[in-house]
Amino acid sequence: MAAKTREPCEHLPVARVCVDVPLAHLDRPFDYLVQADLAETAQPGTRVRVRFARQLVDGWVLERAEASDHGGKLAYLERLVSPEVVLTAEVARLARAVADRYAGNLADVLRLAVPPRHARVEAASTEVEEAPEPAPAPDTAGWEEYRASGFLRALEEGAAPRAVWSAMPSEDWAARIAEAIGATVSGGRGAVAVVADARDLDRLDAALTATLGPGRHVALSAALGPAKRYRAFLAASRGQVPVVVGTRAAMFAPVADIGLVAIWDDGDDLHSEPRSPYPHAREVLLTRAQLTGAAALVAGYARTGEAQLLVETGWAKEIVAPRETLRGRAPHVVPAGDDAQLARDPAAATARLPSVAWEAARHALKDDAPVLVQVPRRGYLPSVACADCRTPARCAHCSGPLALRSSQATPACHWCGRVAAAYTCPSCGGRRLRAAVIGARRTAEELGRAFPGVPVRTSGREEVLRTVPGGAAVVVATPGAEPLADGGFGAVLLLDPWALLTRADLRATEEALRRWMNAAALARPGGRVVVATDGALPAVQALLRWDPAWYAARELAERRELGFPPASRMASLTGSPEAVADLLAAAHLPEGAELLGPVPVGEEERMLVRVRRARAAALARALHEAAGVRTARKAAQPVRIQVDPLDLF
C-alpha cells in the first residue's frame, strides 16, 4: 500500500519545535513542516511528536512561521499529541530566560514547567469556563500594622510594586499574602504564590478561599498526583482561575495577565529544584516579574542575603513593622549562655536543658499552655561515642556513624544499616557507649520524665503534626516540622543550637536564624523563647531584637567582602577529575573568572568558578557552550553544572 502523500498547509507552514532531547549542543528550535490537516490544531504551545535522529521524540511547538532558514529538506510533524495549548508564550519566554540563567537546556526547563499529559483529565472538560467575577478589595487592616496599605492600593490599581516583607511574630502570614493576591485580582490581574511545603500550602489555600471565595484559585503541587495536578494546571492555562498557589511546581504556572508573584520563606532549601538545571523558585519568580512587569513580594520571618540585596540595590522596598508595634507582638527571647545566666546557673554552659529553659517550660505548662521544643536532629541517638575516651563510634565495614534507634536497641550503622552488637572502641578497647548527639525521640523521652503527667508529642520525619490543642503539652519537633498551636505556644525552647551553627556551610548561621525565627514566631505574644547558646552571637542578637534586616545586611556585607553569593555569581562543576578538566578546557570563561578548587566529593571532584555579578550571563553562556562541545563529541563522563547552588561548600 502506497504511503499517504502529505502536503504542507498554506498559512504558516513551518513549526519551530523545542525537541525534548537533553543534549546541550541541540538546545535550539528545529523547523518542521505542518501538514494541511494540522494547520488549525498544531498551534504554538501544543505538544507534538517528531522524528529526530531516526527516533520518535516529544516536542513543543514554540511558534509558526511562513518560511525556514534551513536550506535542506524539512521533515513533517509526525503527529499532534493534543490540540491543548499547554505552553503559553509568556511561560516559553520565561523558560528560555531560566535556562540561560542556569546554563541549562530549554527542554529541561519545559519539563519542569509543563506537567505530563493526562488524557482522561484533558478530555473530561474541553469547554473553557468563564472565570468568576473579581473579588471585592480585601481588608487592609493587617497591612496597616506595617504602614504598608499603600502596597495593596498599588496592586489594586494595576501597578507593579516590589517588596521584601519581614513578618512579625505570630503573624497570620497566609492571610496577608491572600490579601495582597486579593488586591491584585480586584485590579483585574492574576497572581502566582509559591510556598515551601504542603503544610504552608494548606494554610495559604484556606486563606485564599476565605479572601477570594471558592473557584477563584487552584493549588498546584507535584505531590497532588498526575490527575489532580494536571487538572489544576489546565484550570490555569484555560483561564478558569486567575490565581495559582503551590510549591515550587507552581513557579511556572500559566496564569494569564500576571500581576503579582509572591514567595514565602525563600530561604527554605525546598525552594531549590533538585532536577536540571536546578533553578530556585525565588529567582524564577523574580525573573518572571522582570519580564512581565508584575509586582513581586518576597516574604518571611527571616531575611536571606538575596532578599537583602534586592533592597540595597533599590529593586525592592522593604516592609517592616514599626518598633513600637513589634514590641507588642514579639515574644520575650532569653539566651541561656550569656554572662548573667551563667552567673545564676554555672551548669547552663554544659546542660542541655538549662534552668532558664526548664523554668520557662514549667511556667507555660502551669498556665495550661503548650511548650514547643526544637531539636535539630531526628531519631533517638543519631550519633554515639565511646563512654571512656569519647571517640566517635563508627561502623567497622563502611566507617559510617553508629546510632541507637531506642533505649533498648543495638547500635547500628546510620549508613549501611549493619548491626554492631559487639562494638569495641578501636582507640581504648572500651565497650560502653554514650550519647554524642541526642535526637528528637530521646529528647521527648527525657522531657516526659522531667514533666510527669504532661502529654509529650513529637513532630518530625515519621509524623508531621499540623496543629496541636492549646492545653498543657510538650511538643518536640525538628526544624520545619513545628505545628501550629491554638493561641500560640507559651514557651519555645531552641535546643542544641551548635548543631545548626557549626555546619560546614556558607549559609549555616543564616539558616540557623531562619529556623529559630520560624519556631519563635509560633509563640504567643509575650511568650518565652529560650535559645540555649551565647547571647553575644550576631544571629542570637538578631533573634533577641527580632531584627532580621540588620542581620541580613551584616551577612551580605561579609559575603561582599569575601566575594561570595549573592554579592558574586558562582558555578559549581561536579564530575570525575578528567571530565571537569575537559569541560574547563572547552569553556571560554569571561574575563576575571576565578577557579576555586578542586575539592573531593566522594569519588568525584568539585570545582567552583566565581565571577562578578555583571559577568553572570557570560559565565552561564560559556559553561553551556562548553557542555555543548562535550555532548557533541559524545563525552562519556558527565559534569553537573549548578549556578549559585545552595550548598557551595
Image (cartoon, rainbow, N blue to C red):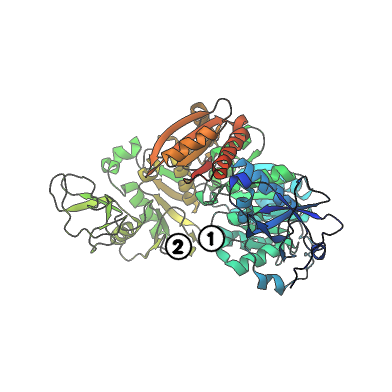
Instruction: Say which residue label 2 marks.
Output: 464
What residue is at 82 percent from the left and 49 percent from the top?
67
Q: Residue furthest front?
A: 1
Measured from the top left, where is residue 267 in percent x and y?
Answer: 53, 46
279 or 293: nearer the viewer: 279
- Tally of marks: 2
Up-down relation of residue 111 to residue 635 (above or below):
below
Measured from the top left, where is residue 428 in percent x and y?
Answer: 13, 45
From the viewer's perspective, is 179 left or right of 24? right
Instruction: Specify which label sits upstream in the sequence, 1 or 2.
Output: 1
76 or 600: nearer the viewer: 76
Up-down relation of residue 361 to residue 267 (above or below):
below
395 or 409: nearer the viewer: 395
Residue 602, label in figure: none
The residue under label 2 is which amino acid type? Val
From the viewer's perspective, is 492 left or right of 248? left
From the viewer's perspective, is 488 left or right of 431? right
Does the residue at mark 1 contact the one at mark 2 (Cβ under 8 Å)? yes
Quadrant of the frame with the C terminus = top left
Instruction: Say which residue label 1 marks.
Output: 199
Quadrant of the frame with the N terminus = bottom right
42 or 4: nearer the viewer: 4
Q: What element carries label 2?
A: loop
Measured from the top left, where is residue 98 in percent x and y?
Answer: 63, 45
Q: What element carries label 1?
A: helix
What residue is at 41 percent from the left and 55 percent from the top?
478
The residue under label 1 is which amino acid type? Arg
Q: Which residue lies furthest to the right in this view?
A: 10
